[in-house]
């Protein structure tokens, strides 16, 4: 499900339902995880962060910088042509659900491309906690969460993914 409003290339305005929370989680993680531009990550933070997470833009801007370094790219300025990251959620789990807060795990394909290393795809588990605020789902500050979800990683759609509790998205 898409949010009701497209703002700065990102959908916001999800319904106050479990489906709305999962849909927001997919959109927000896709946007956060699919950029090598710290300014874009900060903009996503300004649009999606819970009001209590006042450092969200700066915190989220650190992600693309760390990713650039990990990929051997310059930490600032333009990235070389052919360099990109794409986070593609393929399955989900709702870990906890409340009236105004949901914790969601996304099983994602994470594809990186650089001129030197070529294209590589890995599978990862990406957690997000959302809080209902300002008539939309907002991302809470989970920077202190050190939970290791790697034991839940599995090939999407496999018997192991099903055994690990992963669910397919439905429309």
Image (cartoon, grey):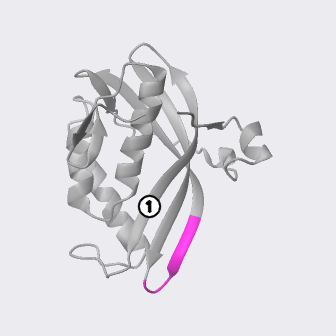
The answer to which of 91 and 97 lies nearer the viewer is 91
Residue at x 38%, y 58% (from the top left corner): 34
Residue 135, how many percent across, how many down? 25, 21
Image position of 57 with respect to 76: above or below: above
Classify mark 1: residues with Cα within 10 Å, few (<14), some (14-19) or many (20+): some
* Residue 7 located left or right of residue 164: left
Please tell me in which quadrant of the rendered image residue 101 appears: top left
| Residue 143 seen in this snapshot | no
Residue 18, how many percent across, how many down? 48, 22
Image position of 12 with respect to 44: above or below: above
| Residue 10 seen in this snapshot | yes
Residue at x 23%, y 56% (from the top left corner): 40
Residue at x 67%, y 44% (from the top left corner): 152
Residue 58, how many percent across, how many down? 22, 50
- Residue where numbered disc 1 is placed: 86
* Magenta run includes residue 116: yes
Image position of 83 with respect to 159: above or below: below
Residue 127, how many percent across, how many down? 49, 40
Which residue range is magenta in the image? 115-121
Please tell me in which quadrant of the rendered image residue 94 appears: top right
Residue at x 50%, y 33% (from the top left corner): 104
Say what secondary structure mark 1 lies in.
Answer: strand
The answer to which of 25 and 69 lies nearer the viewer is 25
């Amino acid at each position: 499900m898409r949010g009701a409003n497209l703002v700065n290339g990102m959908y916001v305005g999800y319904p106050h339902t479990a489906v709305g929370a999962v849909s927001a989680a997919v959109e927000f993680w896709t946007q956060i995880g699919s950029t090598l531009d710290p300014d874009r990550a900060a903009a996503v933070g300004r649009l999606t962060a819970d009001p209590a997470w006042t450092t969200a833009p700066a915190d989220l801007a650190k992600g693309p910088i760390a990713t650039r370094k990990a990929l051997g790219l310059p930490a600032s300025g333009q990235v070389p042509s052919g360099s990109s990251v794409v986070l593609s959620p393929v399955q989900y789990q709702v870990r906890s659900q409340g009236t105004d807060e949901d914790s969601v795990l996304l099983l994602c394909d994470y594809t990186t491309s650089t001129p030197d290393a070529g294209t590589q795809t890995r599978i990862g588990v990406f957690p997000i906690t959302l809080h209902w605020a300002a008539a939309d789902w907002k991302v809470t500050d989970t920077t202190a969460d050190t939970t290791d979800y790697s034991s839940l990683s599995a090939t999407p759609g496999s018997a192991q993914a099903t055994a690990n509790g992963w669910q397919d998205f439905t429309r």
